Amino acid sequence: MLSSAEQEAREQLCMNKKGGKKVQRASRTMRGFVALIALAGAMSLLGCSENVEQAIADDLNNQSFTFSSGAVFNPGLTNITTTLGFFNISANFTLSSAGGTASGTNTFGNACTLTVLNSTYAIGAGPQVNDAIRLDPCDFDIDNHTLLIGNGTTTATSSPGVPTGT
């Protein structure tokens, strides 16, 4: 409970010097408006796109996508820049980072499933032979040319894809 002096001080903070009208409601409205503008600005900076769809072979073929962290592929790649490239009508992939390279086959369905056939990663440092990496979602942002993937616990968005050798 506030003392009468504290209550009076609080009311004085909420009074407009011109006519003594309370400005508390306007202050709340203005804060909400500023928050809305900040949210809209953040969304535009993040490049939100309405043209995101499940990735198909044509989206990924002969493209490589770089991720700031490879944790979505393997916990050993957490905070390590990792590049995922597709070739041969997106039926094959190569995953590479400073610690090694893995390659194998990719299948589409409700997700992208990368099956590792070769790996130079040390155990615990990246994917190993016979690992199956299920990426769900495996979506392609048409406008931004980025790959949006997840593994059930981790999600990642790539930098825009770049063409690779054909």
Image (cartoon, rainbow, N blue to C red):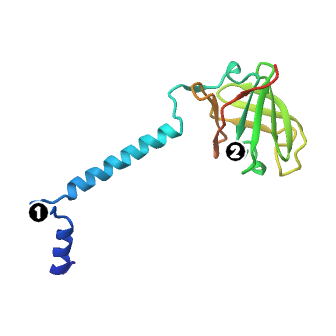
Quick check: 151 above or below 24? above
Of the residues shown, which amino acid type is indicated by label 1? Gly
Q: Nearer the viewer, residue 159 or 124?
A: 159
Q: Nearer the viewer, residue 86 or 45?
A: 45
Pointer 2: residues within 10 angstroms few (<14), some, or many (20+)? some
Q: Which residue is outermost to the left?
A: 19
Instruction: Report the residue marked by disc 1.
Output: 20
Q: Residues within 10 Å of mark 1 (few under 14, many from 20)?
A: few
Residue 130: % across, % down: 85, 37
User: Gap in Å between the C-alphas at discs 1 and 2?
Assistant: 55 Å
Q: Please tell me the numbered disc located at residue 153.
A: none
Residue 45 x/y as whole percent:
51, 40
Q: Quadrant of the N terminus?
A: bottom left
Kindly indicate the quadrant of the structure image that contains residue 120: top right
Identify which residue is drawn at 27% across, 54% down: 28
In terms of sequence position, does the residue under pointer 1 or pointer 2 come before the other? 1
| Residue 121 coordinates in the image, percent (x, y) | 87, 45
Q: Secondary structure at mark 2?
A: loop
Secondary structure state at the residue bearing disc 1: loop
Q: Quadrant of residue 101?
A: top right
- Residue 68, numbered label: 2
Point out residue 150 in the picture as x, y percentages from the top left corner: 65, 39
Q: Amino acid at mark 2?
A: Ser
Image position of 152 (left or right of 17) = right
Q: Quadrant of the C terminus?
A: top right
> Looking at the image, which residue is at 75% across and 48% down?
80
